[in-house]
Image (cartoon, rainbow, N blue to C red):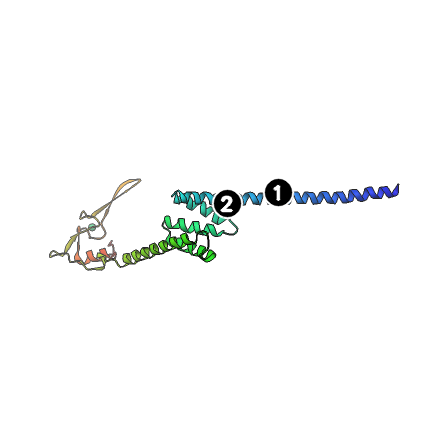
Amino acid sequence: MRFSLVIVFLFSFISSFAQQDAEREKIRQIEQQKEFERVRQIRAQMDSGIYYLDHEEYTLADQKLKYALSNMRSIPSDLTFFFGKNSYFIGKFKQSVDWLTKYIQLKGTTGQYSEEAADWLKRAEQSLLQERQLESQKAAEVLSKDYTIDCGPTGKVTCPVCNGSTVIIKKDYFGETYKTCLYCHQKGYLTCEEYNLLLRGQLKAGK
Ligand SMILES: [Zn+2]
């Protein structure tokens, strides 16, 4: 009798442990399920990004691929390729070069997209170069403000601030207000020297 009691006690003791174990396992499974679902959903966003890229909807593709980039714990090499390729189409050439280079570093010449990646990388690099050349051309533009302009024999120029009217009309919520032009001293014209200063943004307003 006493012996069987001990058995029963022991058995219930063990089974309560087993129950706890089962619960822990259940929680672990639920958490794993959640993580699978999270990864699946991000992967779906990446796939739809690739779909939009293939269908020339580059802005949408950019959104989807960026979502995948910022939510994945580690970035699959495929994504570096697709994001780099799509960046080319939205005109972000530097970004394109960056990600395509990454793909080639990861996969070498034997990756599924290696050839295509090398091809897009070349184009992105060329476009980036062109863009930079254009920028340096812009910087080298010749602008009139860097020169002294000859105002002709009169030595006067109609004041461009007030168009010669000597007043400046300001419109706001309260209606129109009239102010005396502070540049031409109520004359309506500027001397050639003043005019050249104005062009350079160096003519000080009077009082
Ligand atoms: Zn004026």
* Crowd tier of the residue under label 1, counting other residues whose Cα lies within 10 Å: few below 14, some 14–19, many 20 or above: few
SS at circle 2: helix
Drawn side of residue 142 relative to residue 115, left or right:
left
Amino acid type for the residue under numbered disc 1 = Ile
Q: Which one is closest to the eye, mark 2 or mark 1?
A: 2
Please tell me the numbered disc located at residue 152.
none
SS at circle 1: helix
Give 92 or 152, whichever is nearer the viewer.
92
Label located before the other in sequence (2 or 1): 1
Amino acid type for the residue under numbered disc 2 = Arg
Vertically, is 156 above or below 10? below
Drawn side of residue 179 relative to residue 126, left or right:
left
Residue corresponding to mark 2: 43
Q: How many marks?
A: 2
Residue corresponding to mark 1: 30
Name the residue rendered at 42%, 56% in the picture: 101
- Name, please, the residue furthest toward the front: 110
Give 42 or 168, whichever is nearer the viewer.
42
* Crowd tier of the residue under label 2, counting other residues whose Cα lies within 10 Å: few below 14, some 14–19, many 20 or above: some
x%, y% of residue 7?
83, 43
Give 186 or 93, whichever is nearer the viewer.
93
Pointers 2 and 1 in contact (C-beta within 8 Å)? no
Name the residue rendered at 64%, 43% in the picture: 27
x%, y% of residue 2?
88, 42
x%, y% of residue 36?
56, 44
Q: Quadrant of residue 129?
A: bottom left
Name the residue rendered at 85%, 42% in the picture: 5
Drawn side of residue 147 relative to residue 110, left or right:
left
User: What is the distance, in whole Å, between disc 2 and disc 1 at their CAs?
Assistant: 20 Å
Vertically, is 107 above or below 10? below
Name the residue rendered at 47%, 44% in the picture: 47
Drawn side of residue 7 relative to residue 125, left or right:
right
